[in-house]
Amino acid sequence: MNNIRTITACVDGSSYAAAACDAAIWAAGKRDVPLAFVNVISRRKHAAATDYSGQIGLGTREHLLTELAELDSQRARLARERGRDFLESARRRATEAGRPDPIIRQRNGELVDALHSMDDEIRLLAIGKHGESAGQDDHLGSNLERVIRGISCPILVTNQSFAAPHRVLIAFDGSQTGQRVIERAVATPLLSQVETHLVYVGQPNDKRRRQFDDATNKLRAAGAELTTAIIDGDVEPALHDYQRQHELDLMVMGAYGHTRFRELLLGSTTTDMIRRADVPLLIVR
């Protein structure tokens, strides 16, 4: 097993891939750890040597079966070459940004399976909110939800452009995952030297209030330039409204919680949260 843990970006032909590369380059620079790019070739999209023998009328026409198999093989080869071009473009982008010699990986299979097989090698994953094969509606939202469920590392979800964040919103709900968000925020250099807003949605009971105060103290002890807020409303629109009102350029949240945040990344709400976000989301398991 590879013992090197990298900041990894998913690279494909989508308009979001460059931003994912830029986010990974930024994160690798902040943490001073190796940078990697991965291109995953879907077997469903580029299946080689498909079995057509069950098709009516083709069973006895061997030359057609051979030609179809050759065509699939050619498509798979072209997909590999195209993916290598994407990876080479990412390599050049990293070199121009002062991060030469990134690790380059190409995998076959479905995105979730490929990333899951690399889980122990990834410190943080940067991925665009839409992939090459997705429409602009909900396809990648469900795919991304499976990625979030399938791998354990933090995931940085990008829009079509990325700039180094200076003002960050941390969504806090008091759950174990929410407390891990605070622990990571205190420990990671990604959130150092940024203006930080710690936000709770709803009216906390005594326990949650103590947890919120404890999170506040930890962040301030770590030197955070901190603003705290307890706001009313439904979680998703309330967080987006707060982010836009204060012009924050990164949102940080847990993937799963035990209160009103629980629905943030479950089912259709995942798609809504990602689709409506104007800024990158850093999601912590």
Image (spheres, helix red, strand yellow):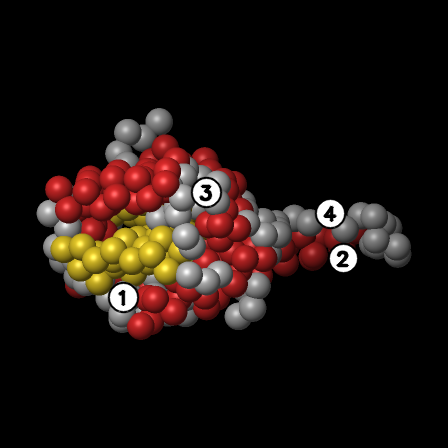
Does dot 3 land on a helix, a strand or a loop?
loop
Which residue does the image show at 86% across and 50% down from the upper left?
Answer: 60
The mark that comes first in sequence, 2 or 3, is: 2
Q: Nearer the viewer, residue 195 or 35?
A: 195
Q: Position of residue 64 (x, y in %)?
A: 76, 57
Query: Relative to 284, does residue 78 appear above or below in the rendering?
Result: below
The mark that comes first in sequence, 1 or 2, is: 2
The residue at which mark 3 appears reads as: 257
Q: Nearer the viewer, mark 2 or mark 3?
A: 3
Amino acid type of the residue tagged 3 in the rendering: Gly
- Residues tagged 1 and 4 counted as in contact (Cβ below 8 A): no
Q: Nearer the viewer, mark 1 or mark 4?
A: 1
Does dot 2 land on a helix, a strand or a loop?
helix
- Residues tagged 4 and 2 counted as in contact (Cβ below 8 A): no
Amino acid type of the residue tagged 2 in the rendering: Leu
Q: Which label was assigned to residue 51?
A: 4
Q: Position of residue 104 (x, y in %)?
A: 32, 48
Query: Relative to 218, does residue 83 appear above or below in the rendering?
Result: below
Q: Which label was assigned to residue 64?
A: 2
Crowd rating for badge 1 (residues with CA inside 10 Å; few <14, some 14–19, many 20+):
many
The residue at which mark 1 appears reads as: 248
**How far apart in space, not on screen, are marks 3 and 1 (Cα)?**
23 Å
The answer to whether 61 appears left or right of 214 in the picture is right
Amino acid type of the residue tagged 4 in the rendering: Asp
Which residue does the image show at 25% across and 55% down from the upper left?
Answer: 228
